[in-house]
Image (cartoon, helix red, strand yellow):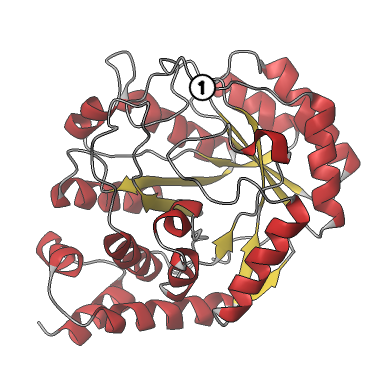
Amino acid sequence: MEICELVDKLENTRDLTDSELKFLLEGDYDVEILRSRADIVRQKNYGRDVFVRGLIEFTNYCKNGCYYCGINCNNKDANRYRLSKSEILECADEGYELGFRTYVLQGGEDPYFTDEVLCDIVSSIKSAHPDCVVTLSVGERSRESYEKLYEAGARRYLLRHETASAEHYGKLHPEKMSLDNRMKCLWDLKEIGYQVGSGFMVGSPYQTTECLLEDLRFLQSLSPDMIGIGPFISHEKSVFAQFPNGSVELTLRLISILRLMFPYALIPATTALGTLKADGRELGLKAGANVVMPNLSPTAVRAKYDLYDNKICTGEESAQCVACLGGRVKAAGYEIVVDQGNVKR
């Protein structure tokens, strides 16, 4: 089948056979055909709008020892921090003045942030800014915890599954962590009523094309509202310090494939893309992504949230970060919008 026919089939049916998907991932063809079709589909559903999410990285403490992560609990050199409630609210207030109407509270799995503490923060943000959406990205918690956070006002939750292959998952995480529990969390979140985001790393150690196919099949079953993918980037203090970084090209192919499979999904052009390639986020937008996440965290802590080496945008003030990303988005041919950016189905 010619590449144009294959792309047509993916757009029209939102599905391909494993061998056809494998060709799109590995094959030698004019990738511009795939990319341009993905861009057409995103414009059909969202125009040239790019939604902004104000990222607040509020703790880099984490109880887990994930082998790929720079803030894993075994990294004794990590410069740990926690933002106070007042500091988090100040970030949200500043973001509101800058035009944000969606916040993403992201952190490691920090036991300090109990349901009581985190629910208080969420409800306080909602009280101060009732027209805003609070998104959480704080890892695996109990269903009861997710229900309490929903009642407090959180409506979106990001939890990347990282890999849908049990064998691969075991190579990326310590034995006490479970892919089954990760999946259970995602299904619990959906059943509670959250808009759910998932996703995976591209080019993580031991990943094969078959792993990526499992990721795509899992996403088809989950049907998430948001899909976040980015290239694996090593961290000097992680178990995988000597492994090569993931491929920007393969990540861009996957963004386009995901746009055609999930035409209504919110797909970020991630910081990791911009870290590996200066115009990586712009290329992500051109490949079908439609979300960017400027950092609202205090400048003093940004460099401490070092999931991987050489992370960009750690020295900019929030207004600078927003202005920079806005300029990049416009230069790529798109427009920043500041509304809640709800999924269109």
Q: Residue at x 61, y 69 (%)?
A: 50
Residue 101 visible in the displayed image: no
Image spot of residue 251 (x, y percent): 32, 60
Count numbered badges in the picture.
1
Residue 332 visible in the displayed image: yes
Q: Which residue is mark 1?
A: 78
Considering the numbered disc 1 on the image, is that residue within a helix, a strand or a loop?
A: loop
**Depth check, front residue: 147 or 46:** 46
Q: In the rendered image of this protein, does residue 186 appear above or below residue 283?
A: above
Q: Residue at x 63, y 38 (%)?
A: 302
Residue 178, by quadrant, is top left
Estimate how packed mark 1 is, as few (under 14), some (14 to 19) or many (20 or more) residues with alpha carbons within 10 Å.
Answer: some
Q: Residue at x 31, y 69 (%)?
A: 14
Quadrant that contains the N terminus: bottom left
Mark 1: which amino acid? Ala
Image spot of residue 60 (x, y percent): 57, 26
Quadrant that contains the C terminus: bottom right
In the picture provided, is 240 more to the left or to the right than 52? left
Q: Residue at x 85, y 38 (%)?
A: 90
Q: In the rendered image of this protein, does residue 114 appear above or below residue 313?
A: above
Image spot of residue 218 (x, y percent): 30, 46
Image spot of residue 147 (x, y percent): 63, 27
In the picture provided, is 261 more to the left or to the right than 318? left
Q: In the rendered image of this protein, does residue 63 appear above or below residue 52?
A: above
| Residue found at the far right of this picture | 128
Q: In the rendered image of this protein, does residue 127 appear above or below residue 21?
A: above
**Depth check, front residue: 27 or 257:** 27
